[in-house]
Amino acid sequence: MTGRFYVTTPIYYVNGAPHIGHAYTSIAADIVARFHRLCGDEVFFLTGTDEHGQKVEQAAQAAGEAPQTFTDRISADFRNMADAMNVSYDDFIRTTEPRHIVGAQAVWEKVAANGDIYLGAYEGWYALRDEAFYNEDEITTRPDGTKVAPTGAPVEWMREPSYFFKLSAYEDRLLELYEKHPDFIGPASRRNEIVSFVKQGLRDLSVSRTSFKWGVPVPGDADHVMYVWFDALTNYLTALGYPDADAPRMKFWPANLHLVGKDIARFHTVYWPAFLMAAGIELPDMVFSNGWWTVEGEKMSKSLGNVIDPRDLVKEFGVDPVRFFLMREVPFGGDSDLSRRSLINRLNVELANDLGNLGQRTLSLIARNCGGILPAQGKHTEADAHLLGQAAVLPDVMKAQIARVALTDALEEAWKLIRACNAYIDHQAPWALKKTDPERMADVLRVLADALRSIATVLQPYIPESMDKMLTQLGVEPGERDFDALEMPLPAGRQLPKPEGIFPRYVEPEVGEAK
Ligand code: ME8
């Protein structure tokens, strides 16, 4: 059954340059989006940039630029990064766009009309770096006297008039939501954390600021701008054309999946559903948090100078090896470390050896021994039927994994088939059949070509550029590359293009040699 699927990434702050962590969540969302397109679903995939708030205002000042000029520049850089990573977003929302500002104000007005926003004064511990207030019991004092939030961000005591959202009134409804929809928060570890946070009791949330101007004006009170998280979260609706109920894209609401990093799970699973309940808007199906990347064992930071621009990795290794490594290295949802050695290892062992060689061996045998013409399907032996059976169920097996956002497990399913194909080719030894039984050789090569077609089809979401090449080499036309098309065997007799290696092995340049 096909349907609609709406998937989002966080909208990234423009106060710093895009790095591998941002690329990670965007690639994960891209895989989900591409997978659903393969299933025949109508997909809407949203990414973008979060451009308001004091942090951005200060970053612009530090760069000596007007905030809008500054955000235009950094936002374009994020878009460029998404393009470089082959992220197939359908829209890129910027919170400084009029369409967003109008929509964010409309959500505010709905919440206010429901009686859930009131004017008060805020006093509390505020961490500028996180754009968030923290409870007293969350604050620790360092030996040098600095007070810090659980994230390590320094906090300061703030007092200003502020509008408040009655978050405290939503405790029970949120707990009921988590109870009734256990899939709302993923992975399960995050869910437990959020449930216990909410059970400890929720305080009303300060949702406006008067201390700076770079934000969405609060409707009816020009002294206040919206708290950047109120503004930002509404992007998932404003990009669809909210509040215009007739906007064509509004059919995609509620979102099926918000992919976020674990640092912002709380904003998406506590504040966001509460705002939506208050506004009388349907809730998204799932908020799934990815784990955290460190680099060579260290937290990425400007001061350590180890912030990795994914585009540099792409220049060196190619886009698909980077995408593959990020999804393969750790079960999706867990934390991981980016090490150059591990990346090179996976590229050489899994892409070049396991998959690349399998393709190369099969296609070059067809080229050499069958005149480059796709053989007909022959009579299947038990071994053939077993391998093809494994290939036939692969899309459904992966579908179930993708539905749980088990992106690494789904990839492993494809790898099981690749390993089975490698065992099969070694065992059948088609190269030796040329003289003894050419008919059987052709049958074996056709079985391999069919299994490879399934593999290349299901791997398109992960490594689109290289699987595009592999499908072309297998003689699969552009219209024959989705899951439905897999049901139809390729007609025999197609002339295949000359096979070419898809995953070159990476050889470290010798010391002193230019890269
Ligand atoms: O939080 N490992 O934006 P942001 C894994 N504007 N993922 C990482 C990562 C790392 N080391 N570093 C960043 C914001 N990310 C808000 C979001 S949404 C309505 C507003 C990813 O620029 C991860 O997805 O700080 C994280 O949640 C996001 O980037 C934070 O991006």
Image (cartoon, grey):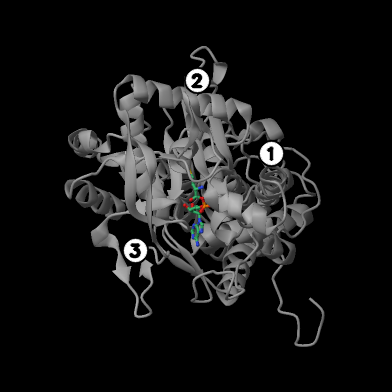
Query: Which residue is tagged 2?
Result: 250
Identity of the residue drawn at 36% across and 68% down: 147
Q: Which mark is residue 476?
A: 1
Structural crowding at the residue carrying mark 2, measured as other residues with C-alpha within 10 Å and reported as few (<14), some (14–19) or many (≥20)? some
How far apart marks 1 and 2 lie (CA) works out to 35 Å
Q: Nearer the viewer, mark 2 or mark 3?
A: 3
The kind of secondary structure element at disc 3 is loop
Identity of the residue drawn at 75% across and 50% down: 370
The reply to whether residue 349 is visible in this rendering is yes
Q: Which mark is residue 150?
A: 3
Tell whether 115 sits left or right of 448: left
Tell whether 375 sits left or right of 266: right
* Vertical side of 25 occupied by 431: above or below: below
The reply to whether residue 180 is visible in this rendering is no
Q: Amino acid at mark 1?
A: Val
Structural crowding at the residue carrying mark 1, measured as other residues with C-alpha within 10 Å and reported as few (<14), some (14–19) or many (≥20)? many
Identity of the residue drawn at 72% across and 51% down: 65
* Vertical side of 241 occupied by 271: above or below: below
How far apart marks 2 and 3 lie (CA) works out to 37 Å
Q: Residue furthest bottom?
A: 511
Q: Do the CB atoms of the residues marked 2 and 3 lie less than 8 Å apart?
A: no
Tell whether 392 sits left or right of 30: left
Quadrant (top left, top right, bottom left, bottom right) of the C terminus: bottom right
Q: Do the CB atoms of the residues marked 1 and 2 lie less than 8 Å apart?
A: no
Structural crowding at the residue carrying mark 3, measured as other residues with C-alpha within 10 Å and reported as few (<14), some (14–19) or many (≥20)? few
Instruction: Tell me residue 267's x, y (percent).
Output: 38, 45
Instruction: Tell me residue 121's x, y (percent).
Output: 33, 41
